[in-house]
Image (tube, rainbow, N blue to C red):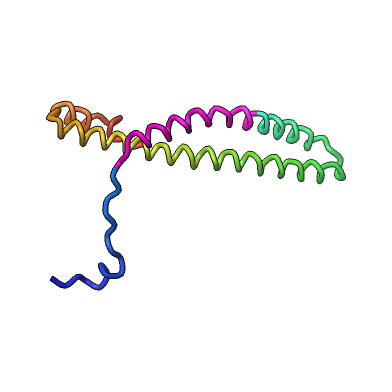
């Protein structure tokens, strides 16, 4: 059988085997590291709040300095949130993959009623 032209250009990649142990370790590492970010964000947000209050009473010459400082603080906040969001999304995908792997293994072990029950549960569908 001749392959269509597009299959020659884009060969299919073999499915990556799920390594649950690596995914679990990665999620644990994320959860341990993520605890450091909220205090940093909180301090920067409080700093921004103070600068915002000052900007309402600042004289024109000081207002420019205030706004430049706000830009620096906002940049720190954006970087922290971006990192937090990316890491959270990646680990959410890992958890979804762990759920799918669990359901696959449970079904292979003959726990069909349990698998069916879990698949009906919206929480186990991971539609978040």
Q: Quadrant of the C terminus?
A: top left
- As displayed, is residue 16 above or below residue 103? below
- Marker count (numbered): 0
Q: Quadrant of residue 89?
A: top left
Tell me if 15 is positioned left or right of 33 in this view. Answer: left
Decide if residue 124 is on the left or right side of residue 88: left
For residue 19: magenta?
Answer: yes
Q: Is residue 112 visible?
A: no
The residue that appears at 78% across and 36% down in the rendered structure is: 56
Q: Is residue 31 visible?
A: yes
Please indicate whether residue 25 sits to the left or right of residue 85 in the image.
Answer: left
Q: Residue at x 67, y 41 (%)?
A: 74
Position in image of residue 73 (x %, y %) = 70, 39
Q: Position of residue 72 (x, y in %)?
A: 71, 43
Left or right of 57 in this view: 113: left
What residue is at 66 percent from the left and 44 percent from the top?
75
**Residue 67 covered by magenta stretch:** no
The front one of 32 and 100 is 32
Residue 121's place in the image compared with 61, above or below, is: above
Indicate the position of residue 22 as horizontal and vertical percent values. 37, 36
- What span is in magenta? 18-42
In which quarter of the view is residue 109 placed?
A: top left
Give the dominant element type of the magenta stretch: helix, strand or loop.
Answer: helix
Quarter of the picture containing the N terminus is bottom left
Residue occupying image coordinates x 48% and y 39%: 87
Q: Position of residue 13 (x, y in %)?
A: 29, 57
Question: Which residue is at the front of the view, 67 or 58?
Answer: 67
């Amino acid at each position: 059988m001749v392959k269509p032209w597009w299959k020659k250009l884009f060969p299919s990649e073999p499915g990556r085997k799920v390594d649950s142990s690596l995914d679990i370790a990665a999620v644990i590492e994320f959860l341990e590291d993520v605890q450091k970010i909220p205090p940093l964000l909180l301090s920067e947000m409080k700093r921004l709040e103070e600068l915002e209050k000052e900007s309402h009473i600042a004289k024109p010459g000081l207002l420019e300095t205030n706004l430049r400082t706000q830009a620096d603080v906002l940049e720190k906040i954006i970087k922290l949130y971006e990192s937090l969001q990316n890491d959270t999304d990646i680990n959410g995908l890992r958890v979804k993959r762990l759920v799918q792997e669990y359901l696959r293994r449970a079904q292979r072990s003959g726990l069909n009623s349990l698998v069916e029950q879990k698949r009906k549960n919206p929480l186990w569908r991971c539609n978040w």
